[in-house]
Amino acid sequence: MSTIQKVSSTETKRTSKMKRETLNSIFAFLMGALTHYEHIGADNIPKEGGVIVATNHMSRVDIFVLALNPTRPHITALVADTYQKNPLFKVILNAAEIIWLDRTKADFGAFRVALEALKQGHCLGIAVEGTRSQTGQLLEGKPGTVLLATKAGVPIVPVGLAGTETTFSDLLHFRRTKIVARFGPAFRLPPLQRDSRDEDMKQYTDEIMCRIAATLPEKYHGFYAKHPRLKELLAEQAG
């Protein structure tokens, strides 16, 4: 690479960082003015290197809560391209350098971009359920997170977001929502085995979702409320 190219690349990264810092400052101001938000256990996120932050998803503000985590604020995320229909969200999320995902099909293009981001050492947020929950409870997880994590060989940090589901209704009633983002310990998934791939993917997806559930109050457990693995994790926490 020539000296000119190196300088150009460095300046681009510096400009991108400045834009993101400005954007996060705006997020912090708005979220601080309109909600009471708290991050617990954010130091569970590795300070460097590729990592997946696996989250539940109940509101359009979830991405902003994740972006304000104090450990890896320069986080990117896989976001459904349906959000592009809202001009304001489109502008904000493009500035946040998210990865657009077409959820109507197997979006291999988005998968490749996300995989490359992880290999380059980025922090990537993923809603494991694959869509926003309309019930305020956990839905059944999708296997995409497992595929990315095992392919990239990166750790996963589960995070449970509680309170975001009432953000907009509370605003309409002039109330500030209490939002808690609780991060669990980082963990790694074993490689998928060729002769038990489907079973492994189901087990690993359940493992991620149960670890998310373990960071949330009981009323959010939803699909995983009676899962044996969640009971094990809760017993470990209590012990």
Image (tube, rainbow, N blue to C red):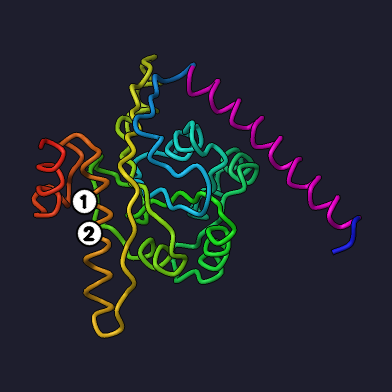
Task: Check if residue 13 falls in the magenta segment.
Answer: yes
The label on residue 20 is none
> Can you name the residue that lies furthest to the bottom here?
195
Between 12 and 143, the residue placed more toward the observer is 12
Tell me the residue that label 1 is attached to.
210
Between 82 and 32, the residue placed more toward the observer is 32
When asked about the image quadrant of residue 192, the answer is: bottom left
When asked about the image quadrant of residue 170, the answer is: top left
Q: Position of residue 179 (x, y in %)?
A: 35, 26
- Judged left or right of residue 112, residue 9 is right
The image shows residue 37, relative to residue 90, as above or below, that is above
- Amino acid type at image mark 2: Asp
- Discs 1, 2 touching: Cβ within 8 Å: yes
The label on residue 206 is 2
Q: Position of residue 143 (x, y in %)?
A: 33, 65
The quadrant in which the N terminus is found is bottom right
The image shows residue 166, relative to residue 188, as above or below, that is above
Residue drawn at x 37%, y 27% as measured from the top left? 167
Between 148 and 162, the residue placed more toward the observer is 148
Whole-Å distance between the Cαs marked 1 and 2?
6 Å
The image shows residue 156, relative to residue 236, as above or below, that is below
The image shows residue 11, relative to residue 116, as above or below, that is above
- Judged left or right of residue 212, residue 127 is right
Between 165 and 51, the residue placed more toward the observer is 51
Residue drawn at x 85%, y 51% as measured from the top left? 8
Residue drawn at x 50%, y 62% as measured from the top left? 102
Q: Position of residue 119 (x, y in %)?
A: 55, 62
Q: Secondary structure at mark 1?
A: helix
Q: Which residues are magenta?
A: 4-32
Q: Position of residue 233 (x, y in %)?
A: 15, 46
- Amino acid type at image mark 1: Cys
The quadrant in which the C terminus is found is top left
